[in-house]
């Protein structure tokens, strides 16, 4: 996890927990997140001037799920994911704007393509995890 200190404050800032960043990332299509096959493409591009080229653009460890595999899993779990996102989101709303949650569900329901499936999967999985592990 990357933590930076604000120049004038002693409280750490964890940028990946910023609601605006989470909302922005959820609004991106899968193709934008994986430009020309690179996972985390926007993060990699944004860090080009801060990290060595070989670090910034190194091969991933296969964290990206195969598209067909993901669609099959989501098809089998979509009811559970959507139910979780409609009924148990109090904790998730600390990290994600409720309107974004509604948009993700609506987009997937209208067009269950790979981009919308990934958004539903990530958001639904995060919601289930947050509800399970938040005290």
Image: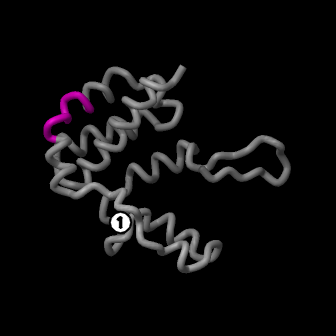
Magenta stretch, main secondary structure class: helix
- Give the side of residue 33 with respect to residue 50, left or right: left
Q: Do we see residue 127 in this rendering?
A: yes
Colouring rule applied to residues:
one colour
Q: Residues in magenta?
A: 75-81
Task: Report the residue marked by disc 1.
Answer: 34
Q: Do we see residue 111 in this rendering?
A: no
Question: Front-most of 101 and 56?
Answer: 56
Q: How many marks?
A: 1
Seen in the picture, residue 9 relative to 43 is either above or below; the reply is above
Residue at left offset 61%, top offset 77%? 52
Q: Residue 69, image x and y in percent?
A: 18, 51
Q: Residue 127, image x and y in percent?
A: 39, 32
The quarter in which the C terminus is drawn is top right
Seen in the picture, residue 15 relative to 49 is either above or below; the reply is above
What is the secondary structure assignment of the residue under circle 1? loop
Q: Residue 88, image x and y in percent?
A: 37, 22
Question: Front-most of 24 and 52?
Answer: 52
12 magenta-colored? no
- Give the side of residue 110 with respect to residue 44, left or right: left
Asked where in the image residue 35 lies, by quadrant, the reply is bottom left
Residue at left offset 46%, top offset 23%? 90
Q: Seen from this angle, which residue lies furthest bottom?
A: 53
Q: Residue 86, image x and y in percent?
A: 31, 25
- Give the side of residue 14 with respect to residue 53, left or right: right
Asked where in the image residue 38 lies, by quadrant, the reply is bottom left
Q: Residues within 10 Å of mark 1 (few under 14, many from 20)?
A: some
Residue at left offset 47%, top offset 73%? 58
Seen in the picture, residue 51 relative to 116 is either above or below; the reply is below
Seen in the picture, residue 10 relative to 93 is either above or below; the reply is below
Residue at left offset 78%, top offset 51%? 6
């Amino acid at each position: 996890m990357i933590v930076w200190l604000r120049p004038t404050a002693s409280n750490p800032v964890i940028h990946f927990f910023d609601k605006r960043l989470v909302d922005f990332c959820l609004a991106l299509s899968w193709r934008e997140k994986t430009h020309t096959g690179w996972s985390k493409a926007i993060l990699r591009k944004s860090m080009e001037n801060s990290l060595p080229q070989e670090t910034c653009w190194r091969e991933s460890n296969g964290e990206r799920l195969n598209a067909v595999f993901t669609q099959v899993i989501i098809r089998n779990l979509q009811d559970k994911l959507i139910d979780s996102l409609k009924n148990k989101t109090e904790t998730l709303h600390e990290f994600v704007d409720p309107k974004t949650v509604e948009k993700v569900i609506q987009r997937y329901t209208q067009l269950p393509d790979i981009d919308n499936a990934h958004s539903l999967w990530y958001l639904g999985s995060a919601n289930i995890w947050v509800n399970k592990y938040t005290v």
